Amino acid sequence: MTHNDIKWQQHDVNAAQRQALFGHQSAVIWFTGLSGSGKSSVANALEQALAAQGKHTYLLDGDNVRHGLCADLGFSAEDRTENLRRVGAVAGLMVDAGLLVLSAFISPYRNQRELVKSFIPPGKFIEVHIATPLEVCEQRDVKGLYKKARAGQISHFTGISDPYEAPQHADLVLDTSVTSLQDSVQQLLALLKERQIIS
């Protein structure tokens, strides 16, 4: 069997019907930024706010997917790209299911984020750059990873021994060292309303 033998199975319940059922559009809100920038905290707070409004959500977190979906992958450049390819494919299916998908991943390279975007229907990928400065992220060092990276115990660590390519055209830029969690959520909700994802 080849890929040519595999056909996309059409279903009787489609994305438009799910949107009508849920009362909101589906989309991927993609949080990118350095380790310790606040991606997961902001994504989690936004999901709480959306859930309180009765929106249908799912939060995909970088650490969590490595326990199952991507447990077989390491941290080489190739494995990181494959990690994001899988996440993008899953996020695309979740968007088709009518969900608001919040995804918190370092995703340091622009081509990786473009790969993810390729799985998402046009207009349904919202890129949020959590642009907290490296020195602040390193001071937080929530998981002790910066200390290990500085000691040479972790190779290819984004921001220290590997580069981070900031988005050039992010839909929203937040710096959690100067913007509170509450204010970050309010800006995100305003953006989702402006894009007519939610009402």
Image (spheres, grey):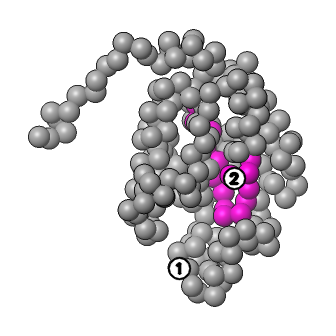
Label 1 secondary element: loop
Viewport quadrant of the C terminus: top right
Query: In the image, is residue 36 part of the stretch drawn in magenta?
Result: yes
User: Can residue 112 be seen here?
Assistant: no
The earlier-in-sequence mark between 1 and 2 is 2
**Front residue of 45 and 128:** 45
Where residue 13 sits in the image (x, y, percent)?
42, 14
Give the labeled residue for mark 2: 39
Q: Residue at x 88, y 55 (%)?
A: 178
Question: Which portion, as a residue range, is magenta?
Answer: 27-42
Q: Residue at x 81, y 43 (%)?
A: 184
Disc 1, disc 2: CB below 8 Å? Answer: no
Q: Residue at x 62, y 32 (%)?
A: 57
Where residue 87 sits in the image (x, y, percent)?
47, 47
Where residue 97 sits in the image (x, y, percent)?
48, 26
Give the labeled residue for mark 1: 155
Viewport quadrant of the N terminus: top left
User: Can residue 103 be seen here?
Assistant: yes
